[in-house]
Image (cartoon, grey):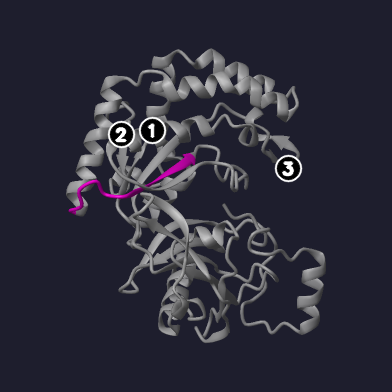
Amino acid sequence: MSDVKPNILWLDDPAAKDNPLLGGKFSSLATSMAAGYSVPPGFGITTQAFREFVKGAGLEDEISRVRKIATEIEPAQLKVETAKLIDQIMTAPMPQDLHDQIAQAYEKLEERTGVIDVPVAVRSSGESEDLAGASFAGQYETFLWVSDVKNVIRYTRQCWAGMFSDTVLTYRHEGKQVAALSDFAICVGIQQMVQARAAGVMFTLDPITGDRSKIVIESCWGLGEGVVKGDVTPTQFKVDKVTLQLLKREPHTQTHEYRFDPQTGEVGFCEIETERQDAICLPDETVIELAKFAKQVEKDRGAPQDIEWAVDDRLQIRVLQVRPETVWSSKPAQPITRVKSPVDYVLKRMTGGQSLIESGRE
């Protein structure tokens, strides 16, 4: 077996499953694809590619300097100190072999999908993601609806540069700045966009109470950015994990959605036509299908999960991210058939219940 580490690794490559070259987020997607989940096709520009770029550009010393001072100076000054490094990452020549491999992989994705200039998500996937529960929630970069290989490479550079933003370098987990813990690299995932009718997140427990007998789904029209960023009030569903009975449907008016805007050529926060604003974006049958899927994922992974999903116009489910739920899952589990009283819920809210956004989403 060759010890050469690849610069490009496809999600459906048998070697991709749980492979650290893909970082936390994308290796989890590779594992999901290997399990038979419906994951959009894509490939990772691996952590090895990042290291090859850094070496070729002669940036090792500057990266070491920035990581060292990240623990020693104030965040405002850190932004000044990292400006040079970020500029170098964005402008330094890329090794021709690496450039060609990225271009060839994007062309192959066009062939696989049958779409010229196939729109993709360009997603950061750091080695440090999910390290000891440190998810870097909301810190790393993601760019949506990117077309053409030149733009793919440009946004890949931005994901690399995002490792050295002041917010990432000052990110703390359990009181420690994660930047000081290791010399991390980053993978950049390139994945076909889903033409989403609706999207959102779901937890295989109740993120407010920690009740593991429930599945909670939050959904919105359009791309899931509306839920993840908190820009819309999503419709919420609650499903019994044992009986798969829909227990709660809480709709909300949605006046805007994230979608591709042909006029600007990028994803925008666009107004929804009047007839959809008060309509529920998911039929009950799809809600139950999502809950069944979430239950299977939890069984496969052996712990409560936090899942990002989307459905297309045919209501086919696509998996965009799977990761462990980190707030409640470390606490002792109660039997899922246990009936909780209202007092249990009130006490749980007083002692640690959190909203979906507060619970550590990206």
Q: Are marks 1 and 2 in contact (CB under 8 Å)?
A: yes
Look at mark 2 in the image and give the residue it sits on: 150
Identify the image quadrant of the N terminus: top left
**Quarter of the view holding residue 217:** bottom right
Q: Are marks 3 and 2 in contact (CB under 8 Å)?
A: no
User: Quick one: label 2, few (<14), some, or many (20+) residues within 10 Å?
Assistant: few
Residue 174 is labelled as 3
Name the amino acid, label 1: Arg
Relative to 287, does residue 136 appear above or below in the rendering? above
User: Quick one: label 1, few (<14), some, or many (20+) residues within 10 Å?
Assistant: few
Q: Which residues are magenta?
A: 114-125
**Quarter of the view holding residue 232:** bottom right
CA distance separating discs 1 and 3 = 34 Å
CA distance separating discs 3 and 2 = 39 Å
Q: Position of residue 362 (x, y in %)?
A: 57, 52
CA distance separating discs 1 and 2 = 6 Å
Q: Is residue 318 visible?
A: yes
User: Quick one: label 3, few (<14), some, or many (20+) residues within 10 Å?
Assistant: few
Relative to 349, does residue 177 appear above or below in the rendering? above
Q: Position of residue 157 (x, y in %)?
A: 42, 31
Of the two numbered discs 1 and 3 on the same chain, state the one appearing first in sequence.
1
Instruction: Name the residue at 38% across, 56% down.
Output: 261
Look at mark 1 in the image and give the residue it sits on: 154
Relative to 199, does residue 137 appear above or below in the rendering? above
Instruction: Name the residue at 64% across, 36% down.
Output: 167
Of the two numbered discs 3 and 2 on the same chain, state the one appearing first in sequence.
2
